[in-house]
Image (cartoon, rainbow, N blue to C red):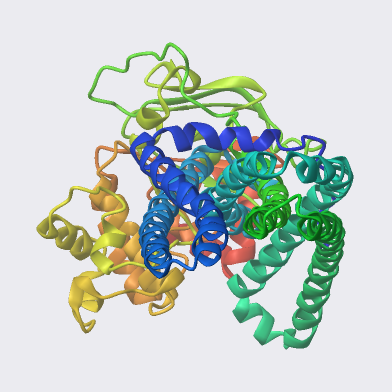
């Protein structure tokens, strides 16, 4: 297992940020309010140097105390306007950023829910979580605060630059000479920052993926005393992330230093010329003070834009990663013109010459020329060694994958011609590895049917022999079961899964070792519940313990992705072959076991 994923470097510049615009446009009211108070606060800021000039040149020179009093009252009023406008500007732009980030997270999450299993075979969950959280937070920072700072600084820069020309065209001309020197490092360093920002986000995703993988397997890590090794691996990933971040920070710091040095160096030189102008009488002191304040605004605005430029580069890298996910399209999707399946669904299934290779294992056929008819209401057991293709058949029936050759029919209709909601809605799955969500017992059972009443949930739990242990919990059906069901035993988790299937009440039932985690007493009770559930339903059962499939209408024996035999238990024993060998391995006294199982 590798600790990092090598990805191509970004070549898109700021183009990925264009994907944010549709999410921003939804909130035109917030944008208008933000820009209104932005204009008001910028106008108030640009008014201050003018007021200072008149205080110096008119009030001090004329020694008019009343004039000075009025001027300072005006300054106080401007400050009040500036404070209120700035607060409201911050409120509206921050609200905009939060809403855009929420929309992005929802869009990414919805896209992830719709992607097919092949995508998840090649992508680590921790990396996806990094894009869902860390990357969207970077975009939120730019939209919610960075954009505000950038626009405010740009407005202030433009206004102060015009005011500089108005105050002293000569000095403003000298200051303009340094502008190309400021833009050049921003362009050159910006490309470097953008690449490092994307690389930094990739390293953070690697770290998140490693942590997620380790914590999800904490029992295995601790049972094999691998804590030190896993800690070392995580430390290496963190150091890799830190080194990338250091390179990005060094580049941004150098860019900031160069730009500020150029800006303030130019201002110092220009002010020196201005001071000489005042000494010669060509310029008033208040006029120079006004020029100084506007020059400081220009310098501050440029410095702020440089800082925001680094954040924009990081957000562009983050949005590129988010855009990659949003651009993903599932290979398994609803047909453009779906076939109508008139209810009720009878549950007849047919595999016709089905051949399938997993995308991650293209050189080996998981299913090879499978042809199988399953009548509505029939119970068929799939047996065979691990890797025979039994679970793959379930995967194809649920249309998690499509076969590369052949087709699968439901009531005579190709699954690929039916809406996914119909295909999967017609099937209830009880998997071998039960998934318990971090929710209450009732909500976990309602996964089978969201709108089910509590009475229906309890009835399903009773049928699955789960009511007793759920009722014994502190809050009964409202008890939180813990992440991945850590508060339940393996058998209890499996009974929750069976209750879901009972509640779903689908015409097709898929049981993948549904009683494997149960003790003998519970298995007997669950087996009776399952037999009631299987009545009048098409049922496919995967079982390694042959004793669990004795009452199946038909047993299909699989090996190497092919069907090698099928029939009733006694018939298959009499034929010999793989099934008889499996039976011999499971029972010490095969003849007596055969008589008991016949």
| Residue 515 sits above or below residue 399 on the image | below
Residues 7 and 481: in front is 7
Residue that sits furthest to the top in the current view: 337
| Residue 382 sits above or below residue 337 on the image | below
| Residue 491 sits above or below residue 286 on the image | below
Q: On the rendered structure, is 210 left or right of 153?
A: right
Taking the spot 23% from the left edge, 22% from the top edge, the residue there is 343
Q: Quadrant of residue 207?
A: bottom right
Q: Is residue 8 visible?
A: no
Q: On the rendered structure, is 6 left or right of 545?
A: right
Residues 443 and 55: in front is 55
Q: How many marks?
A: 0
Residue that sits furthest to the front in the current view: 62
Q: Position of residue 505 (x, y in %)?
A: 25, 43
Residues 551 and 297: in front is 297
Residue that sits furthest to the left in the current view: 455
Q: Quadrant of residue 241?
A: bottom right
Q: Quadrant of residue 375?
A: top left
Taking the spot 18% from the left edge, 47% from the top edge, the residue there is 451
Taking the spot 50% from the left edge, 21% from the top edge, the residue there is 416
Q: On the rendered structure, is 9 left or right of 443?
A: right
Q: Position of residue 105 (x, y in %)?
A: 49, 49
Taking the spot 81% from the left edge, 81% from the top edge, the residue there is 232
Locate the N terminus and report the quarter of the image it occupies: bottom right
Q: Position of residue 301 (x, y in %)?
A: 66, 53
Q: Position of residue 597 (x, y in %)?
A: 44, 57
Q: Is residue 409 visible?
A: yes
């Amino acid at each position: 297992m590798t600790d990092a994923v090598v990805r191509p470097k970004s070549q898109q510049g700021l183009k990925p940020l264009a994907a944010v615009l549709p999410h921003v446009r939804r909130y035109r009211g917030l944008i208008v309010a933000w820009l209104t108070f932005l204009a008001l606060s910028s106008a108030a800021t640009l008014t201050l140097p003018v007021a200072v000039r008149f205080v110096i040149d008119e009030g001090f020179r004329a020694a008019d105390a009343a004039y000075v009093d009025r001027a300072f009252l005006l300054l106080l009023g401007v400050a009040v306007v500036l404070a209120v406008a700035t607060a409201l500007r911050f409120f509206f732009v921050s609200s905009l950023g939060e809403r855009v980030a929420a929309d992005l997270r929802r869009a990414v999450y919805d896209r992830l829910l719709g992607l097919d299993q092949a995508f998840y075979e090649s992508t680590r969950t921790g990396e996806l979580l990094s894009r869902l959280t860390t990357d969207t937070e970077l975009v939120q920072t730019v939209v919610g605060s960075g954009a505000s700072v950038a626009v405010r600084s740009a407005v202030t820069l433009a206004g102060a630059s015009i005011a500089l020309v108005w105050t002293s065209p000569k000095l403003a001309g000298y200051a303009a000479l340094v502008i190309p020197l400021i833009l050049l490092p921003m362009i050159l360093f910006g490309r470097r920052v953008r690449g490092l920002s994307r690389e930094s986000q990739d390293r953070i995703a690697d770290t998140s993926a490693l942590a997620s993988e380790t914590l999800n397997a904490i029992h295995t890590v601790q049972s094999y005393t691998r804590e030190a090794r896993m800690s070392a691996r995580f430390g290496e990933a963190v150091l890799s992330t830190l080194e990338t971040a250091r390179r990005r920070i060094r580049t941004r710091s150098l860019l900031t230093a160069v730009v500020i040095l150029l800006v303030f160096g130019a201002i110092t030189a220009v002010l020196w010329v201005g001071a000489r102008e005042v000494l010669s009488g060509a310029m008033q002191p208040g006029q120079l003070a006004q020029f100084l304040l506007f020059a400081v605004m220009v310098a501050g605005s440029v410095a702020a834009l440089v800082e925001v430029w680094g954040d924009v580069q990081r957000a562009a890298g983050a949005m590129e990663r988010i855009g990659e996910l949003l651009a993903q399209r599932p290979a398994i999707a609803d047909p453009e013109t779906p076939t109508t399946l008139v209810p009720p669904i009878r549950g007849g299934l047919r595999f016709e010459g089905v051949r399938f290779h997993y995308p991650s294992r293209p050189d080996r056929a998981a299913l090879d020329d499978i042809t199988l008819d399953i009548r509505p209401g029939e119970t068929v057991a799939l047996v065979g060694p691990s890797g025979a293709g039994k679970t793959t058949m379930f995967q194809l029936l649920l249309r998690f994958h499509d076969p590369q050759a052949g087709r699968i029919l439901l009531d005579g209709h190709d699954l690929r011609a039916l809406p996914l909601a119909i295909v999967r809605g017609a099937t209830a799955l009880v998997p071998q590895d039960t998934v318990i969500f971090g929710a209450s017992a009732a909500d976990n059972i309602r996964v089978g049917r969201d709108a089910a009443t509590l009475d229906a949930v309890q009835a399903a739990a009773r049928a699955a022999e789960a009511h007793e242990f759920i009722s014994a919990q502190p809050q009964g059906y409202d008890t939180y079961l813990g992440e991945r069901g850590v508060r339940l035993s393996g058998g209890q988790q499996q009974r929750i899964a069976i209750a879901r299937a009972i509640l779903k009440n689908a015409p097709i039932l898929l049981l993948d070792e549904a009683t494997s985690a149960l003790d003998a007493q519970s298995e007997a009770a669950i087996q009776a519940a399952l037999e009631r559930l299987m009545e009048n339903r098409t049922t496919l059962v995967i079982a390694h313990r042959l004793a669990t499939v004795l009452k199946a209408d038909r047993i299909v024996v699989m090996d190497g992705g092919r069907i090698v035999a099928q029939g009733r238990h006694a018939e298959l024993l009499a034929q010999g072959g793989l099934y008889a060998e499996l039976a011999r391995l499971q029972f010490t006294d095969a003849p007596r076991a055969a008589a008991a199982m016949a």
